Image (spheres, rainbow, N blue to C red):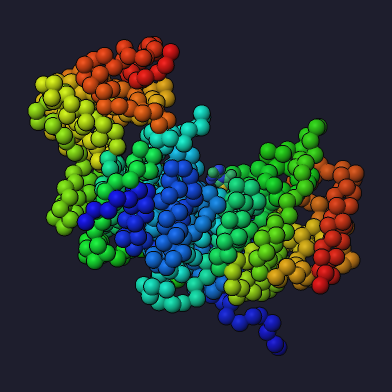
Amino acid sequence: MKKGIEVSIAASIAAQLARVEVIAAYPITPQTHIVEHLAELVANGELDAVYINVESEHSAMSACCGSSAAGARTFTSTSSQGMELMHEILFIASGMRFPIVMAAVNRALSAPLSIWGDHSDIMAARDTGWIMLFCENGQEVVDSTIMAFKIAEDRRVLLPIMVNLDGFSLSHVIEPIEFPSQEEVDAFLPPYNPLYTLHPDKPLTMGAYAMPELYTEAKYAQEMALINSKDVVTEVMNDFSKTFGRRYKPVETYNTDNADFVYIALGSIGENIKTAIHEMKEQGKEAGFVSLRLFRPFPGDELLSVLKDKKRIAVVERAMPGGAANGPLFHEIATLMYTGGIDVKIENYILGLGGRDVLPETFIDIYNGVAHTKDTVPVKEKNYDVIGVRG
Amino acid sequence: MCSVRPQGLSEEFAVSGHRACQGCAEILAVRLALKGFGRDTILVMATGCMEIISTPLPTTDWRLPWIHVAFENAAAVASGVESALKILMEKNKIPKKDIHVVAIAGDGGTGDIGLQALSGALERGHKFTYICVDNEAYMNTGIQSSSLTPYGAATTTTPAGKKSIGQSTWKKNMPKIAAAHNIPYVATACPSYPFDLINKVKKARMVNGPSYIHILSVCPTGWRIPTDLAIRYGRLAVETGVFPLYEIVNGKYSLTYNPEPLRHMVDYFNGQGRYRHLTVKTISKIQERVNLDWKRLKRLCELK
Ligand SMILES: Cc1ncc(C[n+]2csc(CCOP(=O)(O)OP(=O)(O)O)c2C)c(N)n1
Ligand code: SF4
């Protein structure tokens, strides 16, 4: 039965269903409701876990590393500046192969200060060695959180995972969501059985340093684990589909079979793109949409098989390039197409920054090739369009 | 002949093979402390000399479970370890056992970059011991000053020169900062007084809550002294009143060794390259400050 609930609260219930044992977190808008609700669940005895009220995100991620090293199922959540303050430790968590799960409620970065949603934070953290899932709606947040633990803790993986959801436009909306029962989740997700833990009965050294003759090998092994985790992600998604009936794939497609033109995007903006596609269909215009549910490891093969016969591709993203030739997502798609031998026009649109509303009609404008002439000022020497800049 | 050696201390948890400089009192301090903590200990270490000399992959100096995550977060990592042990034991996922978590960091990792994480962990009341091994500078990166570098000491970032006396600020009082968190046990120690150090470690281990031990760890390399003199300089620091040995048990101060009458500072400064440039005037200024601090400490010890 579906229940109308705020997506943040749903995310914390998913962590509760996953029977997390240690939560270390620090509040930041728009992540707050997730950690507040978890603190409440622990305080009321509805979740048998330790909630560590740390003094910063740096310590949140550090405590998560300690907890995971000692063998507890560990959860945290953050946004924006909090993710930046964790940045140093994000690399360490993945390098030390701790299966921590984090709800990353995506938000713009300062300055100027903005509490609203975009992908600046996650794009700054995209190469930290974490597995990254993106969600379009609340149901996906719940399901992905449960799947995340199963993926992270798989002995073939042992890597941390971020479950990304857009700040406010997803985190704070009330949606009808179906929750699996505790018994169903228990059957799907067995208790965490760590391979190595810190314990005096079997002393181990964790976090040693590597001389130049070993560093490359250690990093290569980590990279291989991350790349190979894609198979486990797919496997867990398939298992999930079988158990709970909701289908998930690393690369989701919408109307791509019929269309020569496709949008590619991450996160909840996909819902607006789909609305636009639906409207365009009524006008006889065929457009498709590709949503990267899995962003790290980058699902290149799956994407190529969708993109290979397209005539025009529009990469839509919510982060400034920061002086790069294009937006970060565009880079990856363009590289993939070049190396995959796809030679078609590919466009890059930057939009929805700092919580700016993006309406479905913007995607119709993009399709019609007029998006960049509406309400925009020209940018010199650029390969991308920033939509909606007021002159 | 009767032995004064405390029992059960023959086991080594920091073993030979590490790469500490010759005569390093910091590794000695850690080795002695671990004897006091015993086998059921998990060690969390910050980046610094002790981490770098002990764990080049695939080797290790530690016979205890040991983890290093980063420079500024030993206290936060220890919080996570302690919390995990607690819940896993509560849930009977691991057998119930009195496992003690110990975080160790240098003066930089404690007084500067790690102060926030330390404060958070002390305030949250985790049952763990935090040890600051204080060699009075960032030694691992090559003798740069920290907020625990004493006034007048030359380091590579506070060099003595025509316009500089070296470090121009007074050493931060870390034990007092730790005590201000109202934790049950704070102590200072020095490996030149090994049994005092081990006794304090044993007391810290028994405490039900956070404990903090500040250990003066002479560094021949950074202090520019001969490698056979670390123990002597540790003693001189105590005997001159520069580094008093005391405890703060539930807020109550007490000296654990009274070296009065204090020796003159000159005895301590002599022969240390880092103080070579000090003038008589500066030395007497430091002497005044040390006398004042000593008096204050004694007054604190008298408070009921
Ligand atoms: C965030 C960060 N900044 C700087 C460093 C470089 N660093 C490593 S160890 C160290 C100094 C350690 O000094 P201290 O804590 O006093 O310990 P010691 O080496 O003297 O024992 C520094 C600056 C680092 N590892 N991480
Ligand atoms: S630099 Fe100093 S503290 Fe570091 S290992 Fe050498 S003697 Fe010990």
Q: Nearer the viewer, residue B289 or A172?
A: A172
Res B143 seen here: yes
Residue B136 pos. (x, y %): 69, 51
**Quadrant containing the C terminus of chain A in the rendered view:** top left
Which residue, as the protein is rendered here, is positioned at the far left?
A: A258
Q: Residue at x 83, y 69 (%)?
A: B303
Q: Does residue A298 sit above or below B19 in this rendering? A: above
Q: Nearer the viewer, residue B223 or A151?
A: A151
Q: Nearer the viewer, residue A211 or B104?
A: B104
Res A342 seen here: no
Residue B127 pos. (x, y %): 55, 68
Which residue, as the protein is rendered here, is positioned at the far front?
A: A4
Q: Which residue is drawn at 24% across and 58% down?
A: A180
Residue A352 pos. (x, y %): 36, 28
Residue A106 pos. (x, y %): 39, 39
| Residue B164 picture quarter | top right
Q: Residue at x 11, y 21 (%)?
A: A284
Q: Does residue A216 sit above or below B135 in this rendering? A: above
Which residue, as the protein is rendered here, is positioned at the far bottom?
A: B1
Q: Residue at x 80, y 39 (%)?
A: B165
Q: How many marks?
A: 0
**Quadrant containing the N terminus of chain A in the rendered view:** bottom left
Q: Does residue A185 sit above or below A211 in this rendering? A: below
